[in-house]
Image (cartoon, rainbow, N blue to C red):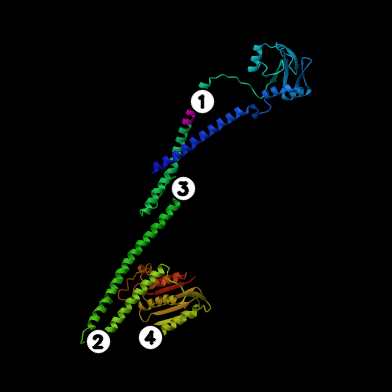
């Protein structure tokens, strides 16, 4: 994968270099072709050749002799040149601004020589003509220079072709080397990222560490965060799966017992010689076992809905003190709890909370029932209302330290609950109800001193 990415990236780099070279070549050819068609005028209107050709408009022939106008003299001064007019024999017939040591006669070979090359005074010469006269225009130390060279067009084209091929190959090799190094630097972390994602796909959530992360440092940081999150979720899933299996095993065991009782007493009811009093006892057992099974399934359904946040909440604005006081009064008026010492305290008369009254009553009752069921009859239970929440405290047996961390987990039953009937969902349901309202629960306990539960709503 790594080398595949490297080759693709390198091919992209070489393609870009190749395209740039040919674009530049086509632009150069286009400029040269345009220059050839348009001529030198497109470069500058003030070149020596142009000035010389156009200077004839400042000259005239009067009485067979060349005459230079005042405008021509001013143009020469401005251009920085001087002028000599020659007849057919090369003799100078007139001059303007010419140096004193300028020759008075030029042979044809001398004219050719000075036109092609500078003289000893670094003067560049230009030649023009008007009727039967020719004129020589000189410029000392000009900005432009004439360079004469001779070449064979076929050899030149062959040489340029070879040079172009050589330059192209050299550029491509340089680009290949640089592109290869850069590709390795870029594609190595990319390949590592792809392999990492494949590992995540295979549920391998191990956190990876890589040196020289470069520009991909945020990507590796996010992938590490994803791995840690998925690892935590996987551990939680395995934990829940284990607990679920344990719960299903417990529920299956709990269902078998009442089902066996129901089946057994139902068979006894078929007997003809069963007395009416026995028949009523058998029916009562069947009814109690059926109710227990219904409560078990209802608790299972409720905890699943709360866990998946599918339970609708009928929230109402409620005065907290009166709500909890009525709940405690109902408990004290119930004959089942008449032997228990349950007291109520409050220092928050006007505190208002918004919650589902039915679900909140069940959550609070679960905590109170838990304090009653798991302690002796002489245990004192205090239910308090404060500005921050509800506190349920007892001075009973307490909860073992190893049970406190798991007591709110679904499907969990404490080590001291073997002989106590229940589904193991009561406290988990209470916690889910509180959290569904945006609240939280804290539980503290000491063996032999009691347990304290605080319900804090947001």
SS for dot 4: helix
Residue position marked by numbered label 2 in the rendering: 278
Residue position marked by numbered label 4 in the rendering: 335
Do tag 4 and tag 1 residues touch (Cβ < 8 Å)? no
Do tag 4 and tag 3 residues touch (Cβ < 8 Å)? no
Mark nearer the N terminus (2 vs 1): 1
Frontmost of labels 4 and 1 is 1
Mark nearer the N terminus (4 vs 3): 3
Residue position marked by numbered label 1 in the rendering: 160
> What segment is highlighted magenta in the picture?
164-169
Q: 455 and 312: which one is in front?
A: 312
Between the residue at mark 4 and the residue at mark 3, the CA separation in whole angstroms equals 70 Å
SS for dot 3: helix
Between the residue at mark 3 and the residue at mark 1, the CA separation in whole angstroms equals 45 Å
User: Residue 352: x, y in percent?
Assistant: 52, 76
Q: Against 350, is 128 above or below?
A: above
Frontmost of labels 4 and 2 is 2
Q: Against 38, is 204 above or below?
A: below
């Amino acid at each position: 994968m790594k080398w595949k990415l490297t080759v693709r990236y390198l091919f992209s780099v070489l393609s870009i270099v190749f395209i740039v070279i040919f674009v530049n070549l086509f632009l150069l050819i286009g400029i040269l072709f345009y220059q050839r068609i348009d001529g030198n005028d497109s470069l500058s209107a003030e070149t020596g050749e142009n000035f010389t050709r156009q200077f004839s408009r400042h000259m005239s022939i009067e009485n067979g002799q060349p005459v230079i106008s005042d405008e021509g003299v001013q143009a020469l001064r401005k251009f920085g040149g001087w002028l000599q007019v020659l007849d057919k024999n090369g003799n100078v017939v007139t001059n303007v601004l010419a140096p004193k040591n300028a020759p008075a006669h030029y042979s044809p070979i001398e004219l050719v020589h000075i036109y092609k090359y500078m003289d000893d005074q670094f003067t560049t010469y230009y030649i023009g003509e008007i009727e039967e006269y020719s004129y020589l225009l000189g410029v000392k130390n000009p900005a432009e220079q004439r360079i004469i060279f001779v070449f064979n067009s076929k050899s030149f084209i062959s040489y340029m072709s070879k040079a172009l091929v050589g330059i192209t190959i050299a550029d491509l090799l340089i680009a290949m080397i640089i592109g290869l190094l850069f590709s390795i630097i870029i594609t190595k972390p990319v390949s590592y990222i792809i392999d990492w994602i494949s590992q995540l796909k295979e549920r391998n959530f191990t956190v990876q560490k890589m040196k020289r992360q470069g520009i991909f440092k945020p990507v590796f940081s996010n992938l590490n965060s994803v791995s840690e999150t998925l690892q935590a979720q996987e551990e939680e899933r395995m934990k829940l799966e284990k607990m679920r299996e344990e719960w299903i095993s417990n529920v299956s065991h709990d269902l078998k017992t009442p089902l066996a009782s129901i089946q057994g007493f139902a068979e006894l009811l078929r007997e003809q010689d069963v007395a009416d009093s026995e028949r009523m006892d058998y029916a009562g057992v069947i009814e109690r076992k059926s109710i227990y099974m219904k409560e078990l399934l209802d608790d299972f359904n409720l905890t699943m809905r709360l866990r998946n946040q599918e339970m609708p909440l009928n929230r109402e604005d409620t005065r907290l003190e009166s709500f909890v006081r009525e709940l405690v009064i109902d408990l004290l008026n119930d004959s089942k709890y008449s032997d228990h010492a349950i007291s109520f305290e409050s220092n928050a008369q006007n505190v208002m909370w918004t919650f589902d009254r039915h679900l909140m009553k069940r959550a609070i009752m679960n905590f109170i029932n838990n304090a009653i069921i798991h302690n002796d009859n002489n245990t004192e239970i205090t239910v308090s209302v404060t500005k921050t929440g509800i506190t349920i405290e007892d001075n009973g047996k307490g909860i073992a330290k190893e049970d406190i961390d798991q007591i709110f987990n679904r499907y969990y039953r404490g080590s001291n609950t073997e002989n106590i009937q229940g589904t193991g969902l009561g406290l988990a349901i209470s916690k889910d109800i509180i959290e569904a309202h945006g609240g939280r629960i804290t539980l503290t306990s000491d063996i032999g001193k009691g347990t304290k539960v605080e319900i804090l709503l947001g």
